Image (cartoon, helix red, strand yellow):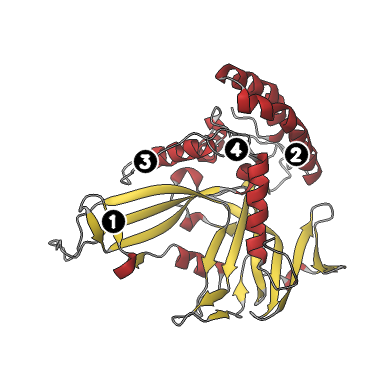
Amino acid sequence: PQFAGYDQHDCQELLAFLLDGIHEDLNRVKKRPYIEDKDCDGTNDTSDSMDAWENYLKRNKSIVVDLFQGQLRNTMKCCNTKIQNADGSTGCGHRNVKFDSFMYLSLPMQDDCQTLDDCLELFCTVEHLTGANQWYCSKCKEHVDATKKFDLWMLPPILVVHLKRFRYNDYGARSKLNRKMNYPVCNWSLDKFIKSSENAHEMYDLYAVTNHYGNLGGGHYTASAMNRFDNQWYEFNDSTCTKVDQSRLGNDNAAYCLFYNRMEKMELENDEEKEDSFRRAAVRRQSVSKPELWPHMQNAAAKKKTKVDVRKSFRDFHKVSMMMLDQLDDTLIMEEEGSEGDMEKMNSNIEPLDNTLVEEQE
């Protein structure tokens, strides 16, 4: 087994392994169609991103997708040195844009990175591909120098951030970067990193952290998490659980994986409530047949609303999740073997549950 024995293992690798396994077991798509990647040139990103998400949902539909998966924009640009342009640049001008799903953000760290935003800026920095890393330009019909750039496009309700503290140097030796990292605990705004106009004004609150102490030869993991029932933070260290003050979070050299909840602004009927009140984001079950529930559409839908419901407790969400899992066993066979008509019938049967879990769209 991959994680057997007493050697030190990477908790982020374990997390990815578990989420991938849960997704595969709960994936409601049993016969995955072949879908060829579409070449995009960046002239219609909004439509292209939704096409890419629809194609992804044709092969992947589970609660893991609903909770943890977002979308990145990956832009490649030709810089063919054989083509000199009048402005001094090189390349034929060809661009290739793809929209890729992601389940967590693995952010690079450098010695000058002091905040989580610094790491995210480094992640979104233009990368130059040369030598053995050249890119094949479909217009030039050869491998050429190129630039590569990632941008955040659409973010999930739960955002998992992995800090790449372990790295290789130019000689292949691996080391750990033990430097303090300042990360937000509340109201982390990602507006300046999100390139989609339909998904701006994203705000996140921290709810859990995994910490690594030690080095490559050996170490120890602990975790801190907020209890949703009493809104207190607790530290989990092997078999010991102790209450900790929130002031201890936000700036340390052990934080390795950070877990954030997306928050949505509330407009309440009670005039005494503050206008800037927030709640945890609603979880919308992703389906090809219901594009109005896709994350790409939520900002536009929110603009049409005048009121939204008050915060739902974690108990309510847990109860609905268990109901969803109970219904999965009854519906998987229909989805695997049924016709399109059977699928519509199944979706209509699940609709009351969806309306319990998701926010009704007007």
Q: Nearer the viewer, mark 3 or mark 2?
A: 3
The amino acid type, in three-letter code, at marker 4 is Lys
Q: Between disc 2 and disc 1, whose residue precedes?
A: 1
Q: Residue at x 22, y 50 (%)?
A: 139
Query: Looking at the rendering, which quadrant does residue 9 occupy?
Result: bottom right
The amino acid type, in three-letter code, at marker 2 is Ser
- The image quadrant where one finds the N terminus is bottom right
Q: CA distance from mark 2 to mark 1?
A: 45 Å
The amino acid type, in three-letter code, at marker 3 is Lys
Image height of 128 relative to 353, above or below: below
Residue 52 at what x, y percent from top left? 44, 40
Q: Is disc 4 placed on a helix, strand or loop? A: loop
Residue 34 at what x, y percent from top left? 46, 36
Mark 3, residue position: 38
Q: Between disc 3 and disc 2, whose residue precedes?
A: 3
- The image quadrant where one finds the C terminus is top right
Q: Nearer the viewer, mark 2 or mark 1?
A: 1
Mark 2, residue position: 321
Q: Is disc 1 placed on a helix, strand or loop? A: strand
Q: Between disc 4 and disc 3, whose residue precedes?
A: 3
Question: Which residue in the rendered view is the most extreme toward the left?
Answer: 86
Mark 1, residue position: 136
